[in-house]
Amino acid sequence: MSSRLVRIARWRYAFGWIISLVVVVISALFFALLAYFLLLLIWSCVDHLWGKLTKAPAPETLFAFHFGPDFFLGLLAVSYVSIYALPFILTLPVTSVIVGLWQAPPRFLFLRPFNRGLLSRPLKRVARRDIAPFGHIYTLSDADINVPWYIRIPILLGQLALFSFRMRTIRDTKQIKAIERKVDRIWLRNINWCLSFKKIFPVRSSDARWREVVDCLLKRSSALIVDVSDLRENVTWEIDRARSVGAEPRILYLISSERAEGSHAALVQALGQGACASRLFRYGRGGLTDRERFRAVLAETVVAHAIAEYGWQRTHAPTRLSIAATVAFVLGLIPVFVNVGLNFAIAWTPTLEFPVFLTKPDHTEVLPVGAFWLTTWFLLILAAKRTQTIRFLLVLQTLLMLVTVMWIGIFLIWIGGS
């Protein structure tokens, strides 16, 4: 079972890179397009003012005045809305598989000394490559690992923040109880995981509440990853607290290669000879020195916890019905992508006869696709009764069918009016 989890984690890691690449490309195109039109607008305004000063007639090709400000503002609005939705839509064939079939992702509590920049950089690499493909990583926020400012204010940069993990600073007991509800929203955390590059969920806490936050996350974690490169008082308290609740067998220790030799005796005394021999792993600037053994031990820890907690039948394996419904959902997206691609191709041709996204629907295509989508919808309904994550795909499938019906209706109204 553990080897199977390792193979799936490798595929999930590859899918995560594909999603990140699409998000980066779309974001770069958006900013490039925005910069281009702003420069064009500035150049048009300068030309216009120069024409007034010299009393020369303004050329008709000036962008800002030939198309008008409404065109420019509309184009800017469309571009801004696109950066919210386009990366998610383009990655939906991959994202839907992860969101729908990752039904019981393990949770990892990542404990480390705060504000240690030299240690945090390689630790983030280890988390992204070797831990995140197995599950969701939660850690306390500090100066090195935190929620960036542009994610805390999602209205600024659209897609870069809309589907990202963010949580208010934990300041009281009521907010600590809310952590459990947020952690249990698996489908939303799966989306956060897909569209996050770091694959880490930082939880910001006040100085008075950080121990309670650790306690809350500790009770809901499948495994703990603790960096012992700098055994400060807070790290020692976290390890002792994990031992007190019986989680010591689920702790994996990390240590910087530069500090491993000099602190070996102290680690044996603090952690025990057995833990240092089997559950202590070194890392350097390039990541873990023994990645395969770490992944194998992490997978075994996850499986052991799942069996102890839920029984063998719930070791993170999706049902056949969920797999069938998810595959049908992905296949149903093919006509959508083909149709959108054709519409964009038509939009860029000079002999455009129909408005964009209003090409004439063909009943020989609409009827089979509609029947397939309806079948997929019923499959998703049946699968969603048992699986929380499938409900998200059910909502998307419902929206897809409604938008298609509206598109056909708009076309019929438009063609009738003409």
Image (spheres, rainbow, N blue to C red):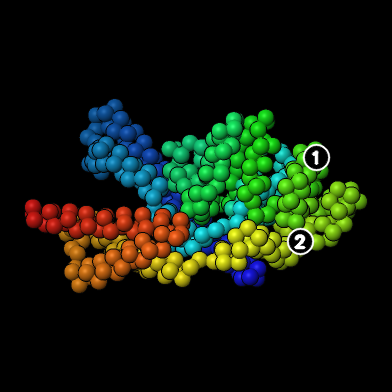
**For this rendering, which residue is in front, 47 or 225?**
225
Can you identify the residue that label 2 sits on?
289
**For this rendering, which residue is in front, 334 or 98?**
98
Q: Is residue 4 left or right of residue 52?
A: right
Residue 357, how many percent across, how many down?
24, 57
**For this rendering, which residue is in front, 330 or 273?**
273
Which label is found at residue 95?
Answer: none
Q: Is residue 237 left or right of residue 193?
A: right
**For this rendering, which residue is in front, 363 or 90?**
363
Q: What SS does tag 1 mark?
A: loop
Q: Are marks 1 and 2 in contact (CB under 8 Å)?
A: no
Mark 1, Cα crowd under 10 Å, few <14 / some 14-19 / many 20+, is few
Picture residue at 26% right of the left edge, 55% below the top = 402
Q: Is residue 176 shown to the viewer in this render?
A: yes
Residue 10, how many percent across, how many down?
60, 66
Amino acid tagged 2: Thr
Q: Is residue 108 left or right of residue 376?
A: right
Which label is found at residue 232?
Answer: 1
